[in-house]
Image: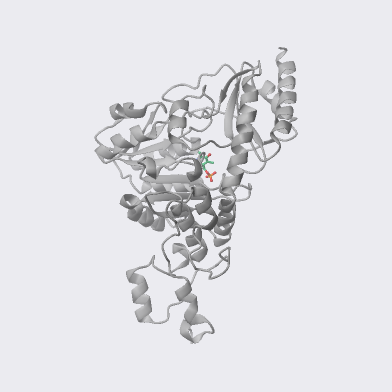
Amino acid sequence: MGRLADQPGGDRRLSRARRTPPVSPAGDAVATTIVHAGRNGYAEGIVNPPVWRASTMLFDSIADLDAALRAPDAALFYGRRGGPTHWALEDALTALEPGAAGTKLYPSGVAAIATALLSVLAAGDHVLIADSAYDPTRLFADGFLKRFGIAATYYPPGIGAGIAALIEANTRAILIESPGSLTFEVEDVPAITAIARERGIATIMDNTWATPLRFQPLAHGCDMSVQALTKYVGGHSDLMMGSVTAAESHWARLKTTTYRLGQTVSPDDAALALRGLRTLAVRLDRHESSAIKVARWLETQPLVAQVRHPALPSCPGHEVFTRDFTGATGLFAFVLTAGGRADTAALLDDLRHFGIGFSWGGFESLAIPADFTGCRTARPADFPGPVIRLSIGLEDPDDLIADLAAGLARYAAALGA
Ligand SMILES: *Cc1c(COP(=O)(O)O)cnc(C)c1O
């Protein structure tokens, strides 16, 4: 009673759930790899791994239990260590990054960033964080790490090799985000990681904007690569999840920290993220081409002071972008020449195709005013007027342009321009 071998089909259940290395056929384009990656035989001939919901996983015997205790990540163990649905997604994400040893999943992008930082930092340490990092990353450093005796310094995103001057004796980690949130500066990642490697400092990159289809942090010297899967990988605005993909040198600590913090996601959500991943390449191509079309059009508008899209030569770090990235995506910002909240409202309130909302990377376009309160300390955010961030969705770009043209006309009327 209870022995798996005695249940109908039981002897096959565990053997099918053994972990096998990710499928990563050498030389294939990432767009090819994402179609098949992670399908490692957990589900035999089923294309999409089924949703395996499980907390308890039964052992055949004490000998079987003891073997599992010696290698708890080798096969089914307990729900908090994940199951075949999680492994399919983890292995797929690992297969997208050359040099990766493994991937862990988190209930949000912020949880992924927090866990990556906690895997390398201890009391008395110092961390360098890009001044343009996602605001909640900053809140985690200032409002949480600080309480545990970990100090943060914010560096200007264009710093490159100049980061050497900010390194202190107790600096243990550098948190890179490129392009930066809200202002889209592109960082010289290889210059930063080369210095960090010499000094034994861990580098963590928030790669949510680019995804591994456009930039591969580990191949550029980073130790850990973070994604808010909530954004492009999920792609349909109905999922919260984060991931950290680590190089061999940081994989064991990441795994242990993740387990000790009790970080886990539901298999239903993992299946949803994996489904999103399969179509990421085609979606990104469309987000990219439409965003560049809209961005170029915005550049011609007299009431637009600046457009911040890394693919445009006017964006800070554009040369580094063309050197290191294999393409762009659909999130960028533009700066208005003048005005305040009411003028911004005149522009955004009646847009037909852009929703006003947080997050991005879904199929639908979004617009939101950037708020720099408390989140630029290395250099003040200095813009002539409001900054609007756009997430360009999968609509026809000409409809989006017409919508923005009408919005800019309302803005002009509000300004009295
Ligand atoms: C949204 C976002 C995150 C956080 O992801 P959540 O899933 O919302 O917690 C992290 N980094 C960047 C750059 C983001 O845009």
User: Can the viewer see residue 132 in this picture?
Assistant: no
Seen from the viewer's position, the closer of residues 183 and 371 is 183
Q: Which residue is drawn at 45% across and 26% down?
A: 319
Q: Which residue lies furthest to the top in this view?
A: 417
Q: What is the x, y in percent for residue 176? A: 41, 36
Which residue appears at 31% of the width and 45% of the height? 122
Q: Is residue 301 above or below residue 167?
A: above
Please provide percent x and percent y for residue 315.
Answer: 51, 24
Asked where in the image residue 344 lies, by quadrant, the reply is top right
Q: Nearer the viewer, residue 152 or 348?
A: 348
| Residue 327, placed above or below residue 373 | below
Residue 259: which quarter of the image? Answer: bottom left
| Quarter where residue 192 is shown | top left
Percent x, y for residue 252? Answer: 33, 55
Give coordinates of residue 385: x percent, y percent. 60, 18
**Colour basis:** one colour
Q: Is residue 406 rendered to the left or right of residue 210? A: right
Q: Horizontal placement of 359 versus 94: left or right?
A: right
Residue for point 37% across, 49% down: 99
Q: In this view, does 333 lie to the left or right of 80?
A: right
* Residue 179 appears in the picture as rendered: yes
Quadrant for the C terminus in the image: top right
Residue placed furthest toward the front: 27
Placement of 35 over or under 7, stated as above or below: above
